């Protein structure tokens, strides 16, 4: 265990002092920014990543998940149905499709002047 990670653990072991733990994580981030040696920078990044993980802030969980081909086909089909509904001025049903895509699949739709775009949240 590196000294930086140990200092975060120490703060948490001291009556769950999360504000001190966050301050220490911020200090690690500052060291990462200032560090010029690539291997030391990686080591510090690992220390910060471990610290974030024990705080429930796992940065790896926030990485976007890839959209599979099956999901892409489903979303594009749903967008076509939604466009037809909007042309028929059935906005409530079109919104229900938008809401279901977000709720069930984590897909966000964005209506633009060039068409509907979608993103995985």
Image (spheres, grey):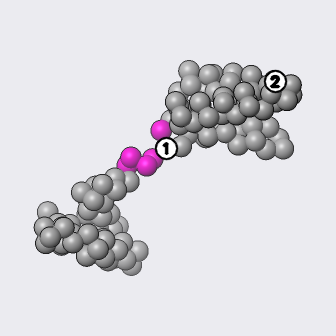
Q: Is residue 28 above or below residue 79?
A: below
Depth order, front residue of 106/7: 106
Assess whether residue 87 is covered by the magenta stretch: no
Q: Is residue 115 left or right of residue 46?
A: right
Q: Nearer the viewer, mark 1 or mark 2?
A: 2
The disc at residue 84 is 2
Q: Residues within 10 Å of mark 2 (few under 14, many from 20)?
A: few
Residue 99 horizontal/vertical position (percent): 62, 34
Q: Residue at x 56, y 21 (%)?
A: 70
Q: Indicate the secondary structure of the residue bearing disc 2.
A: helix
Other-residue count near label 1 (Cα within 10 Å), few / some / many at <14 / 14–19 / ≥20? few
Residue 43, image x and y in percent? Answer: 27, 64
Name the N-terminal-most of marks 1 and 2.
1
Q: Give me the residue at 57% from left, 36% from top.
A: 102
Decide which of 1, 7 is in the foreground and name it.
7
Is residue 96 something one can see in this rendering? Answer: yes
Reply above or below: 24 against 62.
below
Q: Nearer the viewer, residue 32 or 50?
A: 50
Residue 39 seen by the camera: no
Percent across and percent down for residue 41 are 33, 68
- Residue at image x 75%, y 37%? 116
Q: Does residue 37 lie above or below 109 as drawn?
A: below
Boundaries of the magenta span: 60-65
Asked which quadrant contains residue 22, the reply is: bottom left
Label 1 sits on residue: 64
| x and y, in percent, of residue 109 in the image | 67, 39
* C-alpha distance separating marks 1 and 2: 29 Å
Residue drawn at x 49%, y 43% as measured from the top left: 64
Q: Quadrant of residue 94?
A: top right
């Amino acid at each position: 265990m590196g000294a930086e990670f140990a200092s975060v653990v120490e703060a948490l072991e001291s009556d769950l002092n999360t504000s001190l733990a966050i301050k220490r994580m911020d200090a690690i981030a500052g060291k990462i920014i200032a560090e010029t040696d690539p291997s030391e920078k990686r080591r510090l990044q690992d220390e910060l990543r471990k610290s974030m993980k024990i705080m429930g802030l796992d940065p790896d969980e926030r990485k976007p998940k890839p959209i599979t081909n099956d999901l892409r086909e489903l979303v594009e089909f749903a967008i076509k149905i939604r466009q037809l509904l909007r042309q028929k001025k059935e906005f409530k049903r079109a919104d229900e499709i938008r809401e279901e895509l977000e709720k069930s699949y984590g897909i966000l739709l964005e209506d633009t002047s060039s068409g509907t775009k979608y993103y995985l949240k």
